[in-house]
Amino acid sequence: MFVITLTYVAPLDRVDELLAEHVAWLEGQYASGLFLASGRRVPRTGGVILAAGDEPRVRAALAADPFAVAGVAEYEVVEFLPTKTRPELAFLTEL
């Protein structure tokens, strides 16, 4: 599993211009089964994504993000192995 943090490196008005494309890209990643959760950071300096899959697939998906293509965000990818969860999230230890 991966925790991905996005950090905006462009003004928010430029980020907002690409937001609809970014959301469509997110929807595609959810449909493919790669992404498990995503959302904005608080304060709004970027976002966070939880992904399941192998690292090459995750990195290829991130490279296709409209935010990456336009150069408005940078990404940090951290892999981790969940070993303990709340009971309703136990499936995460099997990914």
Image (tube, rainbow, N blue to C red):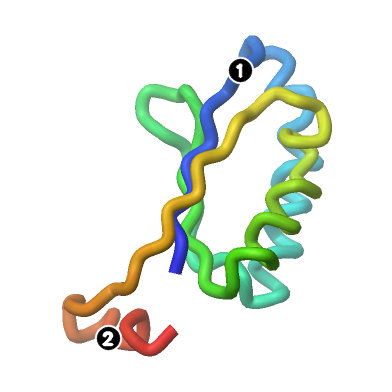
Please tell me whether mark 2 sits on a helix, a strand or a loop.
Answer: helix
Provide residue 46's location: percent of width, then percent of height. 51, 30
Figure quadrant of residue 11? top right
In the picture, measured across the screen, residue 15 lies left or right of residue 87, that is right
Nearer-N-terminus badge (2/1): 1
Q: Is residue 35 positioned above or below 60 on the image? A: below
In the picture, measured across the screen, residue 38 lies left or right of residue 85, that is right
In the picture, measured across the screen, residue 31 lies left or right of residue 44, that is right
Q: Counting other residues with Cα less than 10 Å from the Cα at mark 1, is it few (<14), some (14-19), or many (20 or more)?
A: some
Residue at figure coordinates x 50%, y 41% from the top left: 76
* Between 17 and 73, the one nearer to me in the picture: 73
Is residue 39 something one can see in this rendering?
no
Provide residue 87's location: percent of width, then percent of height. 18, 85
Q: What residue is shown with label 2?
A: 90
Residue that lies at the very extreme toward the front in this rendered image: 56
- Alpha carbon distance from label 2 to label 1: 36 Å
Contact between labelled residues 1 and 2, with CB atoms less than 8 Å apart: no
* Between 13 and 46, the one nearer to me in the picture: 46
Is residue 87 something one can see in this rendering?
yes
Provide residue 89's location: percent of width, then percent of height. 29, 80
User: Of tags 2 and 1, which is closer to the observer?
Assistant: 1
The amino acid on which the numbered mark 1 sits, given as a three-letter code, is: Val
Residue at figure coordinates x 61%, y 17% from the top left: 9
Image label count: 2
The amino acid on which the numbered mark 2 sits, given as a three-letter code, is: Ala
Q: What residue is shown with label 1?
A: 9
Q: Counting other residues with Cα less than 10 Å from the Cα at mark 2, is it few (<14), some (14-19), or many (20 or more)?
A: few
